[in-house]
Structures are given as structure tokens and as C-alpha cells.
Amino acid sequence: MNDISSLYPDRRTFLKWGASAILTTVCTHPVLAAVDPKDPEHHILSFYNIHTGETLKTCYRSSGMLIHRAVNRISHIMRDHRTGEVKPVDPKLLDLLHRIVMEEKPRSPLSIISGYRSPRTNEALRKVTAGVAPKSLHMEGRAIDIRIPGYQTTALRRIAVDLHCGGVGYYPKSDFIHLDTGPVKVW
């Protein structure tokens, strides 16, 4: 299977994604109503998936405790948009994103360029895109490629590098940074 277009969903899968996007958005708001975003005890993240058009704003950690329902929603929005496969996201990755958000205080959600990638998608991308690792942490739910509209990716990169929390890649031509919870390294 060398043709990446064969990885795009059929109509039924696309409709399921739409319904789940609506439910995710509707079901998240009651949780946020009880949470003060300025309270450091509540870790809130906002996402926009550039491929599916889905948005999500949710509190994934409160008073140090993970909110599994919120982590599941984040895992869903970070799914492999080509196959629909979902992999649980590493909470350490969410904590890293939250630290960046607390530092930068963006007005826009984090734009997801790539979250989880199935092995099939990763292999297909390796054949057409330079720089895709054969054992990418994207396949483990431990990596994300992001940008924040209105913010310089160089500034995001600098913040991420200064945190010393994993891998940080910078892709200026595509205007995004890669973050992962693997060993500390920069490229």
C-alpha cells in the first residue's frame, strides 16, 4: 500500500467522527463551567485538529489527579485522522503542553498537525515525507506536532527546549514544532 489516499476514511467513518466531534464539544462545557482557568490546580488545554476541524477545550487534571474522561477526549481528537484509530495519549505529553501553554498564554487553541499515527500511516508517510522516524513516538501516543496561530514557532521551540522534558523538533518550512516524551534531544 504505497498510496496514502487509501488511508482516508469512508463516508460512515467520516460521519462517526462528525457525531463524536459534536458530542465532545457539547459534553465538555459542563466540566469547564466549574473550573477557573487561572487556578493552577486545574490543567486546561484547548485543541484544534487542522485535519478534522474538531475543537476541544477540557480540564484534564485537577488537584494533581488525571481526569480520565478528559484524557480520552484528548486521545480522540489526537487520533490518526487517516484511519480513525485512537491510542491513549501519554499524560506526560499533556503536562508538557500545559507547561508551554502556561508560559505562552495563547489566545488560540493548539493546532494539531499530527498526534497519534498508526504504524500503517507512519510507514506510508515515511515513503513520501523526509524526517518521519521508523519507530516514531507518534505511534505510541507520546508525540505531537503543533503550532499556535499568532505565535512564532521559534518562540514555542525555545520554551520547549528550555523545559528539558523530551524531544523537540523544529520544522520552519512547515511552521510547526514536534514535542515528545522520549529522551531529551533537539533537532
Image (cartoon, rainbow, N blue to C red):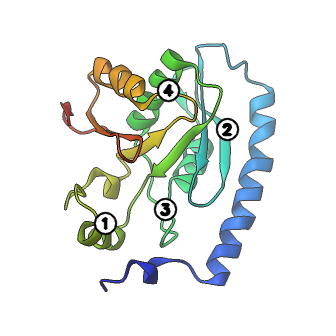
The 10 Å Cα crowd at callout 2, few under 14, some 14 to 19, many 20 or more, is many
Of circles 2 and 3, which is in front? 2
The 10 Å Cα crowd at callout 3, few under 14, some 14 to 19, many 20 or more, is many
Precedes in sequence: disc 1 or disc 2: 2
Q: Tell me the number on the disc at residue 98.
A: 4
Place of residue 146 in the rendered image (x, y in percent of width and height, measured from the top left): 45, 41
Place of residue 149 in the rendered image (x, y in percent of width and height, measured from the top left): 57, 35
**Residue 39 occupies quadrant:** top right
Tell me the amino acid under the disc marked 4. His
The residue indicated by pointer 1 is 122
Q: Tell me the number on the disc at residue 14.
A: none
Tell me the amino acid under the disc marked 1. Asn
- Report the Cα–Cα distance between label 4 and label 3: 21 Å
- Report the Cα–Cα distance between label 1 and label 3: 14 Å
Mark 3 element type: loop
The residue indicated by pointer 3 is 86
Considering the image in quadrants, where does the C terminus appear?
Answer: top left
